[in-house]
Image (cartoon, grey):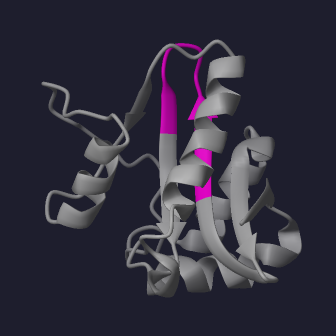
Amino acid sequence: MQIRNYHADDEAEVISLWRRSGLTRPWNDPHKDIARKMSVQSEWFLVGELDGQMIATVMAGYDGHRGWINYLAVDPDHRRGGHARAIMQHAERLLREAGCPKINLQIRKDNADAIAFYERIGFCEDDVVSFGKRLIEDP
């Protein structure tokens, strides 16, 4: 798999991958999520291609205190091939080079496969409660 930065002409393919991977939700407009990422640390929006087909994505970010991972996706037909691990290692390297001491991420409670994956690559559950507050509604 070749890992590269996201380009604007990738949008439709990325959203299709996110939908096939079960990442989209009605309250998060994926077009707006991409536009927002392109305005903040756009170089940390990565895609993975295999034989000219987009099969993976990840958005990384760093706020000066913690790194964050969002939209890690691997095409269901290409899972269990090391692609998620590879694109995560790339994102972790970028964060480490920026001086990031720790990565946070959120996983939906019912996503047992994602929880197991992150545990396999060294993540563990923090003893915290995740809160959120929507500042902009995405109709």
The quarter holding residue 94 reads: top right
Q: Which residue is drawn at 55% across and 46% down?
A: 88
Closest to the observer, 134 or 31: 31
Q: Magenta span has 59?
A: yes
Position above or below: 1 against 90 = below
Q: Is residue 48 left or right of residue 107?
A: right
Q: Majority secondary structure of the magenta segment?
A: strand
Q: Give the range drawn in magenta.
A: 58-68
- Please provide percent x and percent y for residue 107: 28, 52
Q: Residue at x 43, y 79 (%)?
A: 21
The answer to whether any part of residue 73 appears in the image is yes
Q: Is residue 66 left or right of residue 1?
A: left
- Please provide percent x and percent y for residue 130: 22, 36
What is the quadrant of the N terminus in the image?
bottom right
Q: In this view, does 132 lie to the left or right of 89?
A: left
- Please provide percent x and percent y for residue 20: 46, 86
The answer to whether any part of residue 111 appears in the image is no
Q: Residue at x 57, y 81 (%)?
A: 17
Q: Magenta span has 92?
A: no
